[in-house]
Image (tube, rainbow, N blue to C red):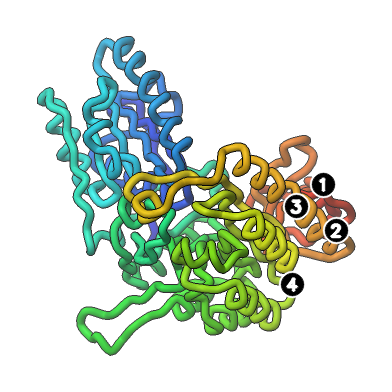
Amino acid sequence: MINKYHSVKPVFNNKLPQLFIETYGCQMNVNDSEVVLSILQDAGYALCEKIEEADLILVNTCSIRDNAEQRIWGRLDHFKVLKKKKKSGLTVGILGCMAERLKDELLNHAGVDLVAGPDSYRDLPRLLAQIRGGDKQINTMLSQEETYADISPVRLDKNGVSAFISIMRGCNNMCTYCVVPYVRGGERSRDPESILREAAELFENGYREVTLLGQNVDSYHWVEESNPTKTTNFAQLLERVALISPQLRVRFSTSHPKDMGDSVIHTMAMYENICKHIHLPVQSGSDNMLAKMNRKYTRKEYLERVKRIHEIIPGCSISTDIIAGFCGETEEDHLQTLSIMKEVGYYTAFMFQYSERPNTKAARHYPDDVPSEVKTRRLNEIIALQNELSLISNQADLGKEFEVLVEGPSKKSDKELCGRNQQNKMCVFPAGEHKIGDFVKIRVTSCSSATLKGIEIK
């Protein structure tokens, strides 16, 4: 059969201007970098893997925490040195959330030639052409329409097995601690037909897993312009992607507890190839903190959602995000977070100290009054508890059988392979004759808090 889909991998050609991309932050940024590569590859650039060979360095940045931004400032000093060394000239551009938030400061840095926000990537070829005239360039205009729906990302992953698909951009939730609505704009959903095309294209190119991405996937809502009575919600989109092929695994992230309805959970239960894992950020176990964070759910409502997930999908794993030391957090609030962790039994979590972000509602109205040493101690207690919960969760899988999608060799031995099961847990097992992209059924024989180890079931 003739493959009607084009290749999704980059083309390397040292006769063309060389582009090097560094990406920081979330999965959305990874996907955005792939969109940028597609745009610039069409404009005559080729990707390179060594920064020293680059004619153009683009850094896709993150503003979610202060330390993420500090890393970028450190990199800019390094790029300034590279620019002096490269006799033929080197262009450096800053993209993404930090570009949106700190546009003027970045443009004034001696190592920076270009600043482009998340909605201006189509303008990069023009901006780069203008730089050749000697002037620095900037475009940080946010858009209420841009979704890059017509652009097929050029994938930057190494294994060709799992890929991200952005289904929407921006966020309307306005959590008081979060900078995302300010740097990525308001929420807008992408045409479902373009999402299905991209997923099918990936499958035809050998990918066996896609992750549908959005700041809040449960609020995905597409209205047909020609027929406003025809709409698509997230449950319907999820089903249509799952129907592309039973050999295509489907994941999604991130869900919001206030918006995740039973229809999505029932769709997950209905299709074997929709993975049985939900990332459900709780942020805090305290109603006082949840209200101050503007999360729009209570502890009770969150736990009811978890209960419903387990009723409809027995064995579904749940991961989460937790913030330690938010404004005004008391010791009792902290204990409430520890207790909800125990009650849910998360298999893993992303855990951070609160980092005040300028111009958010929290920064404007709530003093960052939890001492640094208290934040650190509370975070360490959260991490220690999560390590215990992760081990308990993995121990419960001893003797169970899972289908694993092979992602590559294990870190410790090339005689072993690793990959994730449907519950998103990393599994390690003897390689045998298998290769990347294979589905392998294993039985779990041992575990650590981070990994399941098993043997293949022939």
Asked if residue 153 lies left or right of residue 91, the reply is right
Identify residue type, mark 2: Gln
Which residue is more in the foreground, 287 or 218? 287
Identify the residue at horizontal 89%, vertical 63% (top origin): 399
Q: Which mark is residue 395?
A: 2
Q: Position of residue 390 (x, y in %)?
A: 76, 55
- Badge 4, how many Cα within 10 Å: few under 14, some, many 20+? few
Identify residue type, mark 1: Pro
The residue mark sitting in front, 2 or 3, is 3
Q: Which mark is residue 456?
A: none
Q: Which mark is residue 385?
A: 3
Q: CA distance from mark 4 to mark 1?
A: 25 Å
Identify residue type, mark 4: Gly
Find disc 1 in the rendering and name its residue.
430
Q: Are marks 4 and 1 in contact (CB under 8 Å)?
A: no
Residue 30 appears in the picture as rendered: no
- Badge 1, how many Cα within 10 Å: few under 14, some, many 20+? some
Q: Are marks 2 and 3 in contact (CB under 8 Å)?
A: no
Going from N to C along the chain, the mark reached first, 4 or 2, is: 4
Q: CA distance from mark 2 to mark 1?
A: 20 Å
Helix, strand or loop status at disc 2: helix
Q: CA distance from mark 4 to mark 2?
A: 14 Å
Going from N to C along the chain, the mark reached first, 2 or 1, is: 2
Helix, strand or loop status at disc 1: strand
Q: Residue 271, relative to residue 189: is it above or below?
A: below
Identify residue type, mark 3: Leu
Q: Residue 134, relative to residue 414: is it above or below?
A: above
Going from N to C along the chain, the mark reached first, 2 or 3, is: 3
Going from N to C along the chain, the mark reached first, 1 or 3, is: 3
